[in-house]
Image: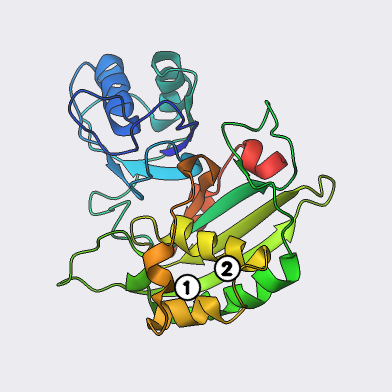
Amino acid sequence: MVVAYDGTDYAGFQSQVGVPTIQSELETAISRLTGTPSRVRGASRTDAGAHACGQVVDFTTESALDSSVFVPAMNYYLPEAIRVTSALDVPPEFHSRYDAAHREYRYSILNRDVASPLLRRTHHLETAPLELSDIRKAATSLLGIRDFRRVSASYPADRSTVRKVLRWEAKRHPSIPDVITIDCAANGFLRHQIRRANAVLIEIGKGKLPIHAMAETLAGRTPIQHRIRTLPAKGLCLKSVHYPGYDHLFAPKVEDKHETH
């Protein structure tokens, strides 16, 4: 299934004891629909407060219901903040996480003096003016095969922090110039990698750091990594997940505020 959600009121995708999560809501809905429990696997374990318009999940069920029934039926049982946008049968060996070739995320920034009540759940407010051209130049340092340990959040020392980044682009909304979006795509992301790398880019955009600070941070040649903040999760949205041979099936069917603002 492809799933969209407003993650504001959830403690992330992955199930946790005693707190609401996207995974637990999906599993509860499946159980109520089919009458039997199923374990859901997600393509990405989005952070607490982060959103999605193209999360992909898979599960096994013995239900005789046709896959087309799952879209309206799941949405009947799910809370309004979560919606299934498409559902289909896949081979038993399919794995939403491990079979993904790359994932695409968007980070949305409202760059003006006053916050927007309408965007407060989906956009991070930055009141200082941002120089978009400097952000774009600095973002090129993130492309290709890079070690992102310096911008990850306490990643285990014995695990690789090397990822292949296909895209890291910043742009202003064509009709709302005080909205800046930063889109990135990679074969995988570390915990808080996007939010921390974009925090460095924002400081560059403010003129508080030179353009080469992004490259220096990744290389560990400056102490900047000790001062990196983690941007709020509310600006982050999982746009889509791509699978060789499956992309035409998993294309997102709906847009959310990250797409329209």
Asked whether, in this view, residue 133 is left or right of residue 198, the answer is right
Residue designated by label 1: 165
Q: Quadrant of residue 245?
A: bottom left
Residue 134: image quadrant is bottom right
Front residue of 63/162: it is 162
Q: Residue at x 60, y 61 (%)?
A: 202
Disc 2 marks which amino acid?
A: Trp
The structure residue drawn at horizontal position 78% and vertical position 47%, both measured from the top left corner, is: 178
Instruction: Quarter of the image for the N terminus: give it.
Output: top left
Q: Total marks drawn?
A: 2
Q: Which residue is nearer to you in this view: 246 or 124?
A: 124
Mark 2 — residue? 168
Alpha-carbon span between mark 2 and mark 1? 7 Å
Residue extending farthest to the left is 158
Say which element carries label 1: strand
The amino acid type, in three-letter code, at marker 1 is Val
Which residue is nearer to you in this view: 20 or 117?
117
